């Protein structure tokens, strides 16, 4: 290193030390947490949150002090010192990131809906070959609240007896019995289906009509 280069290096070091001594670091003006809204559907499910610190010039900076993460309800969702949110029970909570004693802060809204049960309606159905029938799945959280707008996977135990679309529409194909299943993650609900020949179904319905008269 030349004598001039050495002098420049020393000058740069002195400048850095001076900044540290005087506290003249870039001043945080605002914080932005992303994402702003999170939905978690399983206990233990995690989502990483990111906090960006912005100075007065609109530039992202590395804050002199660490970001502090907190949850408005740690029974619903916890958050680690690095911003990792984890679902614990159903409900709504706010995750906050702050610096400078909370004077610069931002939040993320977290909705936790832990699926506890799945029921298929109707639970039992008797169909004639060639008929179609719509089934529905109802999911409930660990507070017994209904969970809307969840897509389940539909299947049947015997595709020769009955088939099902992913909209929950069953078509009776041949005489016999089949189990209709709706699955979401590790949670499953079932319905029992019996398929009869058109002749057998007609006989049953004729008997029901006779009894009702």
Image (cartoon, rainbow, N blue to C red):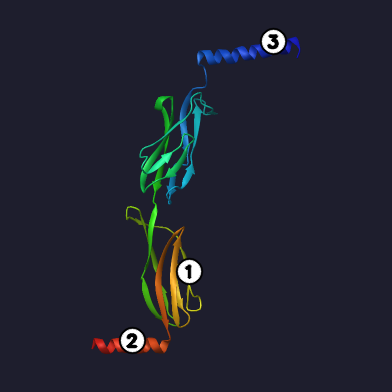
Secondary-structure class at tag 3: helix
Which residue is denoted by mark 3 in the rendering? Answer: 7
Quarter of the image for residue 199 reads bottom left
Q: Residue at x 40, y 73 (%)?
A: 192
Q: Residue at x 59, y 16 (%)?
A: 16
**Looking at the image, how many numbered discs can be counted on the residues?**
3
How far, Cα to Cα, is label 3 from label 2? Answer: 102 Å
Residue 199 versus residue 188 in the image, above or below:
below
Q: Name the image quarter holding the N terminus.
A: top right
Left or right side of 7 for 185: left
Q: Residues within 10 Å of mark 2 (few under 14, many from 20)?
A: few
Secondary-structure class at tag 1: strand
Identify the mark at residue 105; answer none if there is no mark.
none
Identify the mark at residue 155; answer none if there is no mark.
1
Secondary-structure class at tag 2: helix
Residue 159 image offset from top left, x and y in percent: 50, 75
* Circle nearer the N terminus (3, 2): 3
């Amino acid at each position: 290193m030349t004598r001039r280069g050495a002098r420049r290096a020393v000058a740069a070091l002195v400048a850095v030390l001076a900044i540290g001594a005087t506290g003249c670091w870039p001043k945080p003006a605002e914080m932005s947490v992303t994402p702003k809204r999170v939905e978690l559907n399983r206990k233990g499910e995690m989502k990483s949150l990111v906090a960006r610190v912005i100075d007065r010039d609109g530039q992202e900076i590395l804050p002199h002090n660490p970001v502090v993460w907190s949850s408005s309800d740690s029974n619903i969702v916890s958050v680690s010192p690095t911003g990792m949110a984890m679902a614990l029970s159903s409900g709504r909570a706010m995750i906050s990131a702050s610096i400078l004693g909370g004077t610069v802060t931002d939040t993320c809204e977290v909705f936790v809906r832990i699926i506890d049960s799945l029921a298929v309606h109707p639970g039992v159905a008797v169909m004639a070959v060639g008929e179609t029938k719509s089934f529905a799945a109802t999911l409930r959280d660990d507070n017994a609240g209904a969970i809307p707008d969840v897509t389940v996977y539909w299947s049947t135990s015997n595709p020769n007896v009955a088939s099902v679309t992913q909209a929950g529409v069953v078509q009776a194909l041949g005489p016999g019995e089949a189990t209709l299943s709706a699955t979401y993650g590790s949670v499953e609900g079932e319905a029992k289906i019996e398929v009869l020949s058109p002749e057998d179904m007609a006989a049953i319905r004729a008997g029901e009509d006779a009894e009702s008269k």
